[in-house]
Image (cartoon, coloured by chain):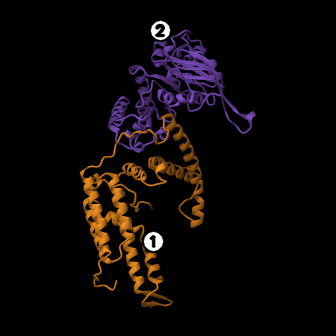
Chain colours: A purple, B orange
């Protein structure tokens, strides 16, 4: 695939990463030669079961950890170069799994201000950024509340606002919905999709829930520290058997279509949503 | 159990005292506490009482609420009084078996009790009228003027504010763990003090493990948001001294001078002390 270098948001080139262990032979090889790229404005879903290296990958993109081998280039900057560290962390913001463990301040708006304060943004501009970020996640009404009084989904939206206030070009979501109830999950997913659609924010969404990425631009499947599949959600999810082999689910409707096809029904193998299923069955 | 302790709690009423800059209140309270230790006669304590009473009225905090704060310290105050009463050498005015009360002992005990009460009331008015965040910001500013502490002012303030942020989270977690352990047959209500203390272990261990995990995740999240200590950091909310703050600082100087002058008064108040 050829593309304009300018449009490259993130470029991961043959990256290896192992977590240190006191016994060198037992070091955990989390990533074994991963190469991938993310374009500006793209919505990319990354899936893989526990231990596939997806969390490690997300931390590499944000320069929290550094590759043992290979390069991670974020917006043209190599994470290995320590001079780039803060620019990279500002460019590629990160939202984590546990909403409680990423809110720092005792008041919502103070927490949103945390990032820009760290960047040394002038006070008046911080105020503007905070108000704008809270408006984007539709949490202005909660600006003066305490984080522990909010629901999981609301806390996660505050975490997103905190990243938005740093004005990043790309946001990495590391299983942001894993600890939320269904309604919280819906809130957060709507916010993420809106950011990508309306604000042209590059989104990398790491998840366990396949339904969340059926309308992603691209899906990347990781297994044992390697990229094993990559492509449009429709072409990935129709490979039900292969996904099951690496311990992954498929969206419910795709699964149903797969089972029905097994029973001899003539249904397309790339059904993703309930609507598509209804259409397929009514034909 | 802990609900009677009013020290460190915030009681919003929107009064003038609440609106003062946290730095003003910290400076005022510090001056007040220091002056308490210079007082040497009842005139001084009378003046201090009047100052405290005025501030309390201005703060619009119910007096009963403040007095409840002293309740928790009754034991410490009693102990100080009893120790001073019997242990100070001097003119004996009464004997109780092998123990004797001296005139000097009575004097020291009274002063100590008053001093402790004023100390607690004075500092709790500060915390009752200042939100924890404002207090932290104010302390960060004040610490910049203390040698040796100056270098860690930002870090200490950040630690305090994170502690404040996580107190409710950890309380919730403790409650959850307690319920989980109760469901598994743990007993926290009966038995001797020692066995009850032992029963707390199954709560404390999971709580600590989770606190460490939280700390690790929070540190990662802070770094991901470009946190790198206090250097070059800006703040959204800027502290600003206003007219009422300048006025309060003038009053503070007057208080210091006034209280110092009382130490020179040599008119007996009608009591032997």
Seen in the image, is A229 located left or right of residue B115? Answer: right
Looking at the image, which is closer to me, B264 or B5? B264
For mark 1, give the secondary structure. Answer: helix
| Residue B236 seen by the camera | yes
Q: Which residue is mark 1?
A: B76
Residue at left 34%, top 52%? Answer: B22
| Residue B167 seen by the camera | no
For mark 2, give the secondary structure. Answer: loop
Kindly identify which chain the residue marked by label 1 belongs to: B
At which x and y percent is residue B87?
Answer: 48, 82
For the residues labelled 1 and 2, say whether their Cβ atoms are less than 8 Å apart. no
Kindly identify which chain the residue marked by label 2 belongs to: A
At which x and y percent is residue B138?
Answer: 38, 51
At which x and y percent is residue A217?
Answer: 49, 16
Looking at the image, which is closer to me, A204 or B18? B18
Quarter occupied by the N terminus of chain A: top right
Residue at left 46%, top 54%? Answer: B147
Q: Give the alpha-carbon distance from disc 1 to disc 2, as whole Å.
A: 84 Å
Q: Are marks 1 and 2 on the same chain?
A: no
Looking at the image, which is closer to me, B74 or A232? B74
Identify the image quadrant of residue B31: bottom left
Q: Which mark is residue A66?
A: none
Q: Which residue is mark 2?
A: A283
Relative to B192, residue B12 above or below: above
At which x and y percent is residue A13?
Answer: 61, 19
Q: Residues within 10 Å of mark 2 (few under 14, many from 20)?
A: few
Q: For the image shown, how many numbered marks are present on the structure?
A: 2
Identify the image quadrant of residue A247: top right
């Amino acid at each position: 695939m050829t593309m304009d270098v300018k449009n490259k948001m993130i470029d991961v080139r043959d990256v290896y990463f192992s977590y240190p262990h006191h016994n060198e032979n037992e070091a955990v090889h989390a990533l074994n030669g991963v190469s991938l790229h993310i374009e500006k404005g793209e919505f990319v879903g990354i899936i893989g079961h526990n231990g596939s290296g997806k969390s490690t990958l997300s931390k590499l993109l944000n320069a929290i950890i550094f590759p043992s081998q290979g390069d991670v280039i974020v917006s043209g900057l190599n994470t290995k170069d320590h001079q780039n560290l803060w620019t990279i962390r500002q460019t590629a913001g990160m939202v984590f799994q546990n909403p409680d463990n990423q809110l720092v301040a005792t008041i919502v708006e103070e927490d949103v201000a945390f990032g820009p304060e760290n960047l040394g943004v002038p006070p008046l501009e911080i105020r503007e950024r905070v108000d704008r970020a809270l408006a984007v996640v539709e949490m202005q009404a909660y600006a003066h509340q305490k984080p522990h009084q909010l629901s999981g989904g609301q806390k996660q939206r505050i975490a997103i606002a905190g990243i938005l206030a740093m004005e990043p070009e790309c946001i990495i979501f590391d299983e942001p919905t894993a600890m939320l109830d269904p309604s919280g999950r819906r809130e957060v997913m709507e916010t993420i999709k809106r950011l990508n659609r309306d604000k042209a924010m590059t989104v990398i969404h790491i998840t366990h829930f396949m339904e969340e990425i059926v309308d992603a631009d691209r899906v990347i499947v990781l297994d044992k520290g390697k990229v094993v599949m990559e492509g449009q959600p429709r072409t990935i999810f129709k490979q039900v058997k292969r996904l099951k082999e690496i311990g992954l689910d498929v969206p419910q409707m795709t699964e149903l279509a797969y089972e029905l096809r097994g029973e001899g029904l003539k249904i397309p193998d790339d059904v993703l949503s309930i609507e598509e299923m209804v259409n397929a069955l009514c034909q | 159990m802990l609900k009677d302790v009013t020290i460190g709690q915030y009681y919003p009423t929107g009064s003038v005292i609440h609106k003062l800059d946290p730095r003003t209140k910290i400076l005022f309270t510090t001056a007040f506490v220091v002056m308490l230790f210079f007082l040497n006669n009842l005139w001084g304590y009378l003046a201090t009482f009047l100052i405290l009473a005025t501030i309390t009225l201005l703060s619009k905090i119910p007096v009963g609420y403040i007095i409840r704060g002293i309740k928790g310290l009754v034991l410490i105050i009693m102990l100080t009084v009893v120790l001073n009463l019997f242990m100070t050498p001097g003119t004996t005015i009464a004997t109780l078996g092998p123990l004797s009360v001296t005139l000097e002992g009575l004097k020291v005990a009274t002063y100590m009790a008053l001093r402790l009460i004023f100390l607690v009331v004075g500092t709790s008015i500060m915390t009752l009228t200042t939100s924890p965040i404002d207090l932290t910001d104010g302390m960060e500013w004040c610490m910049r003027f203390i040698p040796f502490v100056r270098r860690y002012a930002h870090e200490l303030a950040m630690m305090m504010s994170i502690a404040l942020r996580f107190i409710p989270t950890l309380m919730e977690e403790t409650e959850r763990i307690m319920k989980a352990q109760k469901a598994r047959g743990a007993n926290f209500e009966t038995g001797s003090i020692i066995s009850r203390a032992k029963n707390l272990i199954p709560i404390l261990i999971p709580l600590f493990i989770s606190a460490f995990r939280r700390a690790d995740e929070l540190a990662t999240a802070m770094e991901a948001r470009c946190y790198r200590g206090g250097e070059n950091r800006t703040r959204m909310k800027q502290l600003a001294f206003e007219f009422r703050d300048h006025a309060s600082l003038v009053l503070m100087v007057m208080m210091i001078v006034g209280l110092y002058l009382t130490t020179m008064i040599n008119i007996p108040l009608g009591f032997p002390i």
